Amino acid sequence: SAAPDGWSCQVSGQDLTCTATSFPQGTASVTLRGRVAATLQTPTLANKATASAATPDPDADDRTSTLALPVTPRSDIAITKSDASPNPAVPGEPVAWTLTVTNQGPSLATGVVVTDVLPDSISGLAASPGNGFTCGIAGQTVSCEAATLAVGQPVTLVVGGDYDPAASAALVNTASVRSATVDAVPGNDTATATTPTAPRGDLRIGKDELTPLFRPGELATWRITVTNEGPSTVVAPVWVDAVDAALTDASVTPS
């Protein structure tokens, strides 16, 4: 606030200095405001004020006042999760999700941990850590940790793996984030992505003769080969060979 009548106050660096030509008996006060550093981690914030004058003061004990304020860091850690890429997901091909972690303040967040449990249909799990994070994998769980996360600096993590070729249901996946710092808004600490699945196969069929010459009255043999070149497992496959009416007693054996 403004200086009291008869006083002049200035802030220089970390010091507030108020001066007056004279000070009659009574009280003068000012209000000092300042923003606490977002990175402050000490348990208390100490503040010391001293008073002096040219006039002698025999009581020196009360010319100094110290205030120790408790410090309670508080942040708002938030996470978002993209749908799987590609979208829709193709069984038999790699898939990946992008996680974005943000500290929305006001304080520095410490002990930040991101956890993402990938579906059982994902194998060969992998993670690409963002700035300041390290990642580890245990079973289907990807965990990425950072000692600190500054305010307003989003960090991107990518997790994924190989999608089971036989899968058919939608991919549903939830990621979460937590911090050792008090989280003022816990409602944005989880994010779920639901990605549709679109199986895709590539069926090919071929025939080749196993009998060099087809002679009337003798057996003729040929082989039919069907291949699914993927990437997905196909459902209810069927192939048909229209046998010529001149061939009788047709039979089939595996080859």
Image (cartoon, grey):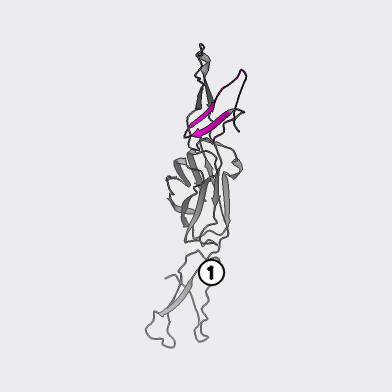
Residue 206 visible in the picture: yes
141 vs 254, nearest the viewer: 141
Question: In the visual, does 4 lie left or right of 201?
Answer: right
69 vs 18, nearest the viewer: 18
Q: Which residues are magenta?
A: 7-34
The answer to if 220 sits in the magenta stretch is no
Position of 90 relative to 52 (above/below): below
**Horizontal and vertical percent position of residue 96:** 48, 56
Q: Secondary structure at mark 1?
A: loop
Give the quadrant of the C terminus.
bottom left
Q: Amino acid at mark 1?
A: Pro
For disc 1, the neighbor class at 10 Å (few under 14, some 14 to 19, many from 20) is few
**Horizontal and vertical percent position of residue 162:** 46, 57
Instruction: Write the residue at 51% across / 30% down.
Output: 16
Quadrant of the rendered image containing residue 221: bottom left
- Kindly identify which residue carries mark 1: 237
Give the quadrant of the N terminus.
top right
Which residue ends up furthest to the left in the rendered image? 212
Residue 120 visible in the picture: no
**Horizontal and vertical percent position of residue 188:** 59, 45
